Image: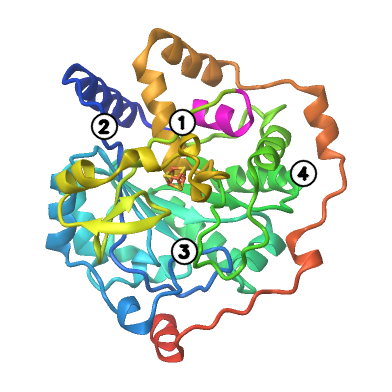
Amino acid sequence: MAVPISQGWTVATYVLKQKIKGRKRYPLVLMLEPLFRCNLACAGCGKIQYPAHVLKMQLTPEECFKAAEECGTPMISIPGGEPLLHPQIGEIVEGLVARKKYIYLCTNALLLKQKIDLFKPSKYLTFSVHMDGQREHHDFSVCQEGGYDQAREGIKEAVSRGFRVTTNTTLFDGADPKSVRAFFDEMMDLGVEGMMLSPGYSYDKAPDQSHFLGKARTRRLFRAMLSNRKKNWKFNQSFLFLEFLMGRRDYSCTPWGMPTYNVFGWQKPCYLLQDGYADTFSELLAATEWGKYGTESGNPKCANCMVHSGYEASAVNDTFGSLRGLWGEAKARLFSGYQDQAALRLLDEPTRPVHAFDPLVQIETDNQVAEETRA
Ligand code: SF4
């Protein structure tokens, strides 16, 4: 089982309580970004393109705890930037674990071996390691040779010390489904608890705008990858969301499902777009014009979006919203083979890896910040 029973139970009871209370809009996972600094400069990332003075800003532990309490979600994802660069990340994680929040600390793992003594193994803490595919693909994706091997070493160290470890993988146009399937085998062999997948989103700020997937290509890629599934592959996310990515079901976006808090405040409306900020979580819920977002809204920024931060909460809401949804999730977990001959044929179609048809995108970063963050 990729998610421990206690975590599954906590999430299920939380969602049911929201439904009993009749809350129309409730959050599921807080996306807590304590800083934007990073020791990588990935071409598909929209977070590290801020000016130097913003990259130097960071949330205090108290601000993180206040955001967690305001929002009240049972799960908190800590992306960034690279959270291990935050000088008080040990204190932040310890405080959130003490509040019994299930933490997914998202890291590229370059510093994981070095910083691992800051943390204690706990059912509440998972290192969610950014791995975008097999060695060549990952190194290209994160624009750093040796990035895959360093992350692999970090995973091995964390697993050997008894930490929960998952991987998170973002897929872009040109991804080779056969290679991604081989990558799943590699990660399961490393002993990770489960894997998380999402298609990339076309951030305005990302330097490489040419490789984001449209909806049809997303469904085709995920159908090829996730049909005819091996029994030992474990996924640490909603199976209905995976079916959504495979084109087996449709959902509307739930932008408030994974609200984002960072150095600017509560980000409107979602993790991906920045249409202003609110000072409090209540203000975010009350003051955001939610009708302007999601696929049905006609907002061009949402047209091709299928990312987990918009749609996984929709899938979880579906799971606990009706017996049909609950049965759908149970069926997906019990009978997850998804035998599909046509999908097998998709695996044999020629692909052109991203790095075969475009040169590596060079990113302009502030030299001083880059040097400081790599130190
Ligand atoms: S569709 Fe995507 S970009 Fe648009 S609001 Fe939802 S999560 Fe954000």
Dot 2 amino acid type: Arg
Residue 254: name its quadrant: top left
Dot 4 amino acid type: Lys
Q: CA distance from mark 2 to mark 4?
A: 39 Å
Q: Earlier in the sequence, mark 2 or mark 4?
A: 2
Residue receiving disc 1: 252
Residue receiving disc 4: 178
- Report whether 146 appears left or right of 278: right
Q: CA distance from mark 3 to mark 1?
A: 33 Å
Indicate the secondary structure of the residue bearing disc 2: loop
Residue located 63% across and 28% down the image: 247
Disc number at residue 25?
2
Residue located 48% across and 69% down the image: 110
How was the colour assigned to the protein in this rendering? Answer: rainbow
Magenta residues, start to end = 240-248
Q: How many marks?
A: 4
Q: CA distance from mark 4 to mark 1?
A: 29 Å
Dot 1 amino acid type: Ser
Residue receiving disc 3: 109
